[in-house]
Image (spheres, helix red, strand yellow):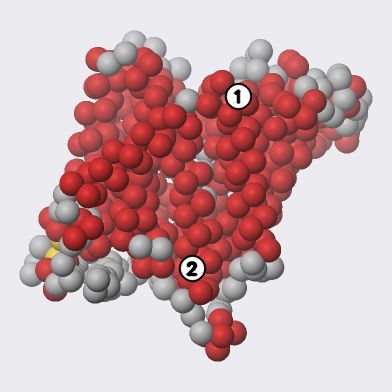
């Protein structure tokens, strides 16, 4: 059988208007989500102080995943990112499954975040209907993304900066309590809380293992760095710079914040009195501590929604160029933005918010469980694509790689084993086990559509699939 020719999806027609500071802060924003401010309490409950080690361990492997992605991204900087690499180096089915799954991933995340934003706004205006503020935020972010990629990058820059300032402030103030007793009557708190209440592993290795699932979930979205490559001004410089800083960001933002919080408060008390971040500012006597953190959480939620709308538009655009989505989505606006993909994704997100009120909560939870499964699947695909990419290159080409993954192939295999261990941890935990049932069902449905729609018999790509603008 004649091998199917693949379309020239490296020429996407997008504008390279993302500056280095945009990419850097987008990378940071991908590392910091609402989960750090609110959801970290559940991870602490599972692992106790050993969550510090879990975040550090997870940080090492997410760094390796991003280095695998970075190796391909620097050589072929496209907004389709790992979807394009899966298509080119693994096969059309892999590109199709990865693209549509990642589109669903961010559509569901956006749906979750916009709904959550409505809840957070009620902190100040309790009488405002939740759906009004959620819809207003969605419309605002949609217009920001439709304007230009530069406008998207600017908003993401400031959203991420607010999160960074809040975390650094908490770490500094918490450090003042630990070493100088500020906010604690002058008595230094020290680090004894890390081992006093049941030891560093109060729930044993089982609790530590379960926490790795929550750690992996917290890091989902960091691969967004790769998606920005197709619109970064100098991807050969900005992408390596952003990726190399990932491990240090994890150490500062996750390991550092957990170290401070668990030193100041006994681990078993966290989660019973609200957000861990609010506790630190409250103890320092900061006025309106809860209001400040609520504002930060809203910006974190808006940041995630902003990124989600950006990614979903690019995924549909990339799939259209592959011939695995209607070519309608390959069209770009006058400002070189995949506006059709953005609008279609946003309409789906808005409809999903209303469906949330109509369908049973169990179905909604099943949809949310797909997020974790898809995230792990995408990371596995990145590692697989990178191995296949290496096999497709000559020895001379490999010696000329600008940003090679360190320790390859050993770091690639060890990271795959870590992801397999996370899946094993999901089997142990009833709350996450459902992902291993619902996720494969989604993949099966996509695969059936792939063959029923005849994508497997698709003819050679034509110029129709190449990007055009509405000016054409």
Label 1, label 2: how far apart the Cα atoms are:
33 Å
Instruction: Please give left or right for residue 380 compared with residue 271 in the image.
Output: left
Q: Position of residue 22 (x, y in %)?
A: 46, 59
Tag of residue 135: none
- Could you tell me which quadrant the C terminus lies in? bottom left
Instruction: Please give left or right for residue 414 compared with residue 142 in the image.
Output: right
- Residue 64: which quarter of the image? bottom right
Q: Position of residue 239 (x, y in %)?
A: 51, 66
User: To which residue does mark 2 refer?
Assistant: 388
Residue most extreme to the left: 472
Considering only vertical position in the picture, is 196 above or below 309? above
Q: At numbered mark 1, what does the secondary structure look like: helix, strand or loop?
A: loop
Q: At numbered mark 2, what does the secondary structure look like: helix, strand or loop?
A: helix
Instruction: Please give left or right for residue 302 compared with residue 248 in the image.
Output: left
Considering only vertical position in the picture, is 400 above or below 273? below
Tag of residue 429: 1
* Of residues 382 and 335, the one drawn nearer to the viewer in this rendering: 382
Whether residue 15 is visible, yes or no, is yes
Considering only vertical position in the picture, is 31 above or below 271? below
Q: Which residue is rendered at x = 16% and y = 49% of the image?
A: 453
Q: Which residue is rendered at x = 52% and y = 73% of the image?
A: 390
């Amino acid at each position: 059988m004649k091998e199917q020719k693949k379309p020239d999806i490296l020429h996407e027609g997008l504008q390279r208007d993302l500056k280095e500071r945009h990419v850097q802060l987008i990378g940071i924003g991908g590392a910091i989500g609402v989960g750090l401010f609110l959801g970290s309490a559940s991870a602490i409950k599972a692992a106790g102080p050993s969550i510090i080690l879990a975040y550090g361990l997870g940080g090492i492997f997410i760094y390796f995943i991003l280095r695998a992605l970075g190796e391909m991204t620097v050589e072929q900087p496209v907004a389709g990112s790992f979807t394009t690499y899966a298509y080119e180096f693994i096969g059309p089915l892999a590109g199709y499954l990865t693209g549509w799954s990642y589109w669903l991933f961010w559509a569901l995340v956006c749906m979750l975040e916009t709904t959550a934003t409505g809840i957070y706004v009620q902190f100040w205006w309790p009488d405002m209907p939740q759906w009004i503020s959620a819809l207003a935020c969605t419309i605002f972010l949609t217009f920001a993304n439709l304007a230009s990629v530069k406008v998207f990058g600017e908003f993401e820059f400031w959203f991420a900066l607010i999160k960074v300032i809040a975390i650094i402030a908490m770490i500094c103030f918490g450090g003042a309590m630990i070493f100088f007793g500020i906010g604690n009557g002058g008595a230094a708190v020290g680090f004894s809380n890390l081992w006093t209440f049941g030891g560093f592993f109060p729930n044993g290795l089982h609790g530590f293992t379960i926490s790795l699932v929550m750690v992996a979930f917290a890091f989902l979205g960091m691969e967004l760095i790769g998606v920005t490559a197709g619109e970064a001004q100098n991807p050969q410089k900005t992408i390596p710079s952003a990726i190399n800083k990932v491990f240090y960001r994890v150490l500062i933002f996750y390991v550092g914040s957990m170290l401070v919080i668990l030193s100041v408060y006994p681990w078993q008390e966290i989660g019973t009195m609200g957000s861990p971040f609010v506790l630190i500012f409250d103890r320092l006597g900061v006025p309106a501590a809860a209001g400040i953190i609520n504002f930060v959480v809203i910006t974190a939620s808006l940041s995630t929604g902003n990124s989600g709308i950006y990614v979903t538009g690019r995924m549909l655009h990339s799939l259209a160029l592959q011939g695995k989505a209607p070519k309608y989505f390959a069209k770009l606006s006058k400002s070189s933005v995949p506006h059709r993909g953005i609008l279609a994704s946003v309409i789906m997100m808005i409809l999903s918010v209303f469906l949330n009120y109509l369908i049973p909560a169990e179905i909604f939870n099943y949809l949310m469980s797909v997020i974790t499964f898809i995230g792990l699947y995408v990371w596995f695909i990145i590692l697989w694509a990178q191995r296949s990419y290496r096999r497709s290159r000559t020895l001379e080409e490999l010696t000329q790689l600008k940003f090679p993954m360190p320790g390859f192939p050993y770091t690639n295999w060890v990271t795959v084993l870590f992801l397999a261990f996370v899946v094993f941890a999901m089997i142990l935990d009833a709350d996450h086990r459902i992902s291993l049932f619902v996720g494969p069902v989604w993949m099966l449905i996509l695969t059936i559509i792939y063959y029923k729609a005849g994508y497997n018999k698709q003819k050679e790509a034509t110029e129709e699939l190449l990007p055009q603008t509405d000016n054409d």
